[in-house]
Image (cartoon, rainbow, N blue to C red):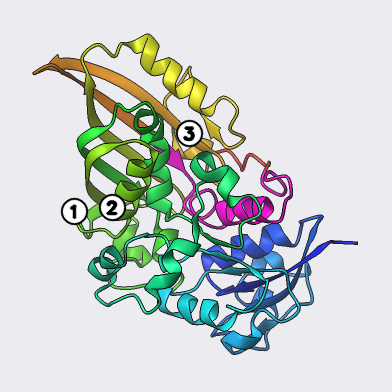
Amino acid sequence: MKRFKATVLGGSGFAGAELVRRLLQHPDVELVRVAAADHVGEPLSAAHPHLEGMTDLVFENPPPERAADGVDVVLMGLPHDVSVRVVDAVLDSDVKIIDLSGAFRLRRAEAYAQNYGAEHPRPELLERFVYGLPELNREKIRGARWVASPGCFATCIELGLLPLARAGLLRGAVHTVGITGSSGAGVTPSATTHHPVRANNLRTYRPLVHPHAPEIEETLVAAGARELRVDFVPVSAPLARGIFATSFARVPADVDHARLTALYVEAYEREPFVRVPRARPPEVVAVAGSNYAEVAAVLGEVEDGMRLVTLFSALDNLVKGGAGQAIQNMNLALGLDERITLRDPGGYP
């Protein structure tokens, strides 16, 4: 018999589909409710045709105070303002929350206001959430009550830079270009995201003001970076899944190839979902559909006493960048093996 019961809120989107697919296969967690604002009363296959015949569950739309009834954990793929209302409704319960929105990722309420254009409605709750990057906060996540899962771009870029931050080598400005697939824009198409415009196009959006930039800065400073500024330019690409990030930083001139390689190998050799490929650079096709990420670092020339280092990182925005990492966090918070339902390598090509 399964030990835990789970609810997914915001289950009709792409991240919701990935949450549901993996929870239906979980040996220790029973998915008992999937909520959404649309498809109410319809089977899950109405939004997710690949789930046809896998479950008898139908979409529900309970009020926030009922969303957590009878369950041990709630996974929320909701807009940030709705996430806050759900947290408010379960303050006095023991239910665990894994939030995929940006509502509780930032520690500073003023940073939230700058990103979302409004004051945080419950700033006193920000410090009660653990930032859900297992490669940085695994022990804090283990057994935590509330976890804020990182953003997709943030996860990809942070994993590329984290070893430098931990070694005290990350300082000053970092310039990053992140290329992302269309599923990151959500189910509902817009003038700039639907297929005819996106299929044969590359375009930037929110350059230098993307809300994941302060999230990346906070996380890496907590890991050891100093005086950090992340100049981030996101680019939409004609692929459905995946993020590929290229980051440029400067390290002291005495950092050589052997030391840099050792930093990345030591940082990730025991991590179940981060790979440092030796024979090829990171690439999206190697991680698409999976919870794995790939990272690599390349040294450049010395200039003004500093050496350029270029970081490459790749992951699936819906899995390690979203639902898969949320399940990894759920597993840790429930005291389970974090790898459960996440070991599959995805398809190729």
Q: Name the residue rendered at 62%, 50% in the picture.
A: 328
Q: Quadrant of residue 80?
A: bottom left
Q: Name the residue rendered at 75%, 77% in the picture.
A: 57
Q: Could you give the CA–CA distance between mark 2 and mark 1, rounded to whole angstroms?
A: 8 Å
Q: Is residue 328 left or right of residue 77?
A: right
Q: Position of residue 136 (x, y in %)?
A: 49, 41
- Asked if residue 316 lies in the magenta stretch, the reply is yes
Q: Could you give the CA–CA distance between mark 3 and mark 1, rounded to whole angstroms?
A: 24 Å
Q: Is residue 245 left or right of residue 159?
A: left
List the residue tagged with mark 3. Answer: 294
Single out the mark in the foreground, 2 or 1.
2
Instruction: Indicate the secondary structure of the residue bearing disc 3.
Output: strand
| 3 or 2: tag closer to the N-terminus | 2
Instruction: Indicate the secondary structure of the residue bearing disc 2.
Output: helix
List the residue tagged with mark 1. Answer: 208
Q: Quadrant of residue 246?
A: top left
Q: Name the residue rendered at 35%, 36% in the picture.
A: 224
In magenta, the rendered stretch is 313-342
